[in-house]
Amino acid sequence: MNAQAKFPSPYELKAPAGAEGWRDLYPYYALFQQERKAGDEGQFWFCDAQHWPTPFRPFDTIMADYAVKCLGQYNTRHLMVPPANGVDYRIHNGYLYLSPIAVEPEKIPARVPHFLERAGFYFQNWNKLLDNWHVKVRRTIDEMEALRFEPLPEMVAKEWVFEGRGLDDTYDLLERYDTALQLCYKTWQYHFEFLNLGYAAYLDFFGFCKEQFPNIPDQAIARMVQGIDVDLFRPDDELKKLAHLAIETGVDAALMTGSVEQALAAVAALPKGKQWLDAWTAAQNPWFNFTSGNGFYSSDKYWIEHLDIRSGICGTTSRSSGRASQSNGRPHKWPPSVSVSPGNMQSF
């Protein structure tokens, strides 16, 4: 009899050649440990390559800690999602693996009324709560942007010595560092406040469509909501506007000139260059506070700090668009009334 095929155990997988000491880079609690072997091998683990496609730097495990904790927090303490407690995570060979944590079947019924009451309140007061969410998040962004990290001096200022302050500049540096981490943690909490409810609403809508129109393709349902105005798509939309403006003002060829500094100088020398440069500057804050990665790695590059990324793509977009003035924008129109009510949520 042939042995039944199965996924390999992380306890049996060897480190790649040259990376044998990788476990020493990460905190012990994030690793598969021998004392947890029985429980770990009884769970299904998958590599979350969507959110963490490359190995971690040790510092970046902070993001996994915050994300996993806050996801579980909203499932188990805020919304009381009936069947799900969140996920657990491990790092193996530098990659992140997740395992869903289900609620014991006998505990699900008791969570249902709590979920309907709490999630139902959010759906019934969505606009007001979302407006408040924007206020909270923007305040947190302002606090982050107010932080300053200056180079440390060669010596403590003599005024500090004479006044008996008893501290040096590293105290303020570490205090700001701790503040930055706390603000990051707060942002992860806000992130999950609406996220899973949005997924739940979409799944409810998806199930309704499948029930009413059994033959409807999945993609057709997705297209029904693709026009929703989401800030995540706005940076790309702004880039498309700049690309089309470059064509209209005749600066598109100049954008393909050398480095970003050289390209912008070439644009500035053109008759309508100032018009394009004004639009370029106006788009940067806040829409260039966006990353070429996913924001979970400290190595990710942000557009606002690496303008060569955006200017190069903008020039390429202009060139590939040709002289046609057709729009590359997405339609922003919500489909006719579709409501999500606590009654519709019984399926959860």
Image (spheres, helix red, strand yellow):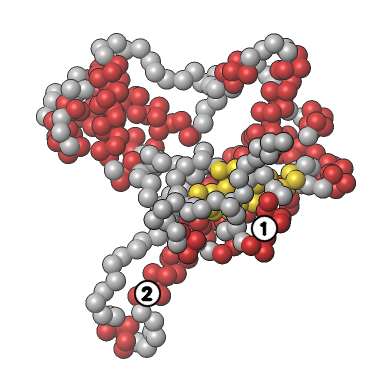
Task: Residue at the far left: name it.
Answer: 269
* Residue nearer the viewer, 111 or 151: 111
* Residue nearer the viewer, 183 or 134: 183
Residue 337 spot, x, y in % from top left:
68, 19
Residue 293 spot, x, y in % from top left:
41, 41
Between disc 1 and disc 2, whose residue precedes? 1
Q: SS of the residue at dot 2?
A: helix
Residue 279 spot, x, y in % from top left:
29, 31
Mark in the foreground, 1 or 2: 1
Task: Residue at the far front: name it.
Answer: 1
Instruction: Describe residue 74's horizontal placement relative to residue 295 as left or right.
Output: right
Residue 219 falls in which quadrant of the image?
Answer: top right
Q: What distance separates the C-alpha of mark 1 from that of mark 2?
A: 42 Å
Q: Residue at x 30, y 16 (%)?
A: 321
> The C terminus appears in which quarter of the rendering?
top right
In the rendered image, the vertical position of residue 125 relative to residue 40, given as above or below: above
Q: Mark 1 near mark 2, Cβ–Cβ under 8 Å?
A: no
* Residue assigned mark 1: 37
Q: Residue at x 69, y 48 (%)?
A: 43
* Residue assigned mark 2: 170
Q: SS of the residue at dot 1?
A: helix
